[in-house]
Amino acid sequence: MKYRFKQLNNDLIDSFLSLNNLKKEDLNYLDYEKEKKPEAFIKFAEKFKELKDDKILIIGDYDCDGICATTIITDLCNKLGYSSNYYIPSRYDEGYGLNKEIINKALANSFTCILCLDNGISAIEEINYCKENNLKLLIIDHHEYSSLPEIDALLHPDLLPEDYYDACTAGLCYGLYTCFLNSDKMLAYAGLATMADVVKVFNYNRYLIVEGLKRINDNMAPALTALLEKIPADYSDLSFSLAPKINAVSRIKGNNVNIMVKYLLQEDSLIIKKTAKSINLNNQNRRKISQDMLKKVNDEIVSSSIIYLADESFQEGMCGILAGRLANQYGKPALVLAKNKECLNGSGRSIETDLYQLIKAYPGSLLKFGGHALALGISLDLKEEESFVTYLNSLNIQQAYKDAYLLEEEMINIDSLNQLKSLEPFGQGLNKPIFALNVPKNYSYKLIQDKYHKFICNGFTAMCFDPKVYKEDAQYWIGTLLKDKYNNTAYFRIEDMQ
């Protein structure tokens, strides 16, 4: 990884925000439930009211955002007494989003309306098929599109004021929910989904994340609390504990992701406890599969300007995890695909480069393609692979730099940690800072358990838990500030050396 070093001054918060072209007021958020609802919410709510006599089929997506969105709208339908059912397609057997088979099943079961959540905005063929069969179609989605679809009602961030610009689908669903009712539990789900979907952490999104975490810690969403390893949870627990467990259900082949909606709607504490245990075991399996996939990565693969990895042993649902890990580790866009006899299916991730536009510009043919600038899903015919890889290799993508903020030794203290905490939640648009520290001239060190380096410096301690990053002649230690819970001091955790 390459780093772009930036100098902090003694006022850690002001200098950090200034270096990111932000001000303290950018971290403010309003109580959106007390604010006047934007017109797009009101218009969609009016259309939603007209569905009271319809039989509604809710079609969701299999990631955390789609699962939480499906839960929120299903709960709203239940509370309003609407006739509805939900269905999230199998990642493996059906793929992403609305398809004709689902529409035909809806017709066969007398549904009069389809409501797509976190999908549908680009499904032009399926939209036309619904029209041909006189099915009402409403869509709540935040994905990119070529043109706005002609449907009964659409709720999308582009139709909302700037404060809602980067809302995820569950956030949009919660905004609709509050046009009718209030729910602490649904706010918790919207906050989790917002954190999980890596959208910008300002304005409406910041409100959802901050207030959602409060509800989780107050046990207002028991299904989430049951999955946590500690209470109170913090923002990193949303990203690295809760979201992966909810996502893991659809990632493992053979699982039915619809059980997650049922789980999140569950009220019985015994059933919640039993199901949570099963979800945790499933997540352990997901970790093992991820580790096995990582073994396929080699120096030749990561040397390209766009990392491309395809293998017959991969499970499609796990590709996004590995792609994200590779993109973050090497500062390059990464595509990871599961290969079978006919096609390749997988995911792409990027930390800076607009991968969506690069793949969209591919002159060949793709079976499926969709997503965002930094995260996408893709499917291509096996016969297309050689041409596709040739195209990727023709692109000259510069490796991204990560910002590393130069920290003075005297700033490694509890006060700095508290200042950093006041900036939370970190996320898209406000990344958690990586710090660079000039290696002190005088220090002593010892090996812990014969592999971990502990550096005793003047006034602070530094720890390096990865022996592979240790460099005796390093100029910089690069890492994060953490709290030593045993003696209430700050220490520097070294994650790289240069």
Image (cartoon, rainbow, N blue to C red):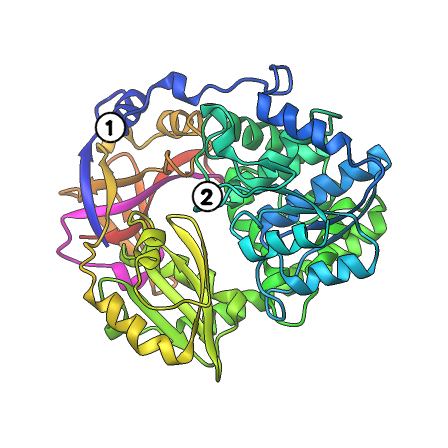
Span of residues in magenta:
464-485
The numbered dot on residue 19 is 1
Horizontally, residue 4 falls left or right of residue 368, namely left
Based on the displayed image, in which of its 4 quarters is residue 21 positioned? top left
Q: What kind of residue is marked 2? A: Ser
Residue furthest to the front: 132
Based on the displayed image, in which of its 4 quarters is residue 324 positioned? bottom left
Q: What kind of residue is marked 1? A: Leu
Residue 432 x, y percent position in the rendering: 37, 38
Q: Is residue 426 magenta?
A: no
Horizontally, residue 17 falls left or right of residue 101, namely left
Q: CA distance from mark 1 to mark 2?
A: 36 Å
Residue 474 x, y percent position in the rendering: 15, 53
Residue 34 x, y percent position in the rendering: 64, 15
The numbered dot on residue 229 is none
Residue 340 seen in the figure: yes
Residue 464 seen in the figure: no
| Circle 1: element type | helix
Which of the two residues, 64 or 16, is positioned nearer the viewer here?
A: 64
Which of the two residues, 217 or 397, is positioned nearer the viewer here?
A: 397
Q: Earlier in the sequence, mark 1 or mark 2?
A: 1
Quadrant assignment for the N terminus: bottom left
Residue 352 x, y percent position in the rendering: 30, 47
- Classed neighbour count for the residue bearing mark 2: other residues with Cα under 10 Å, few (<14), some (14–19), many (≥20): few
Which residue corresponds to mark 2?
147
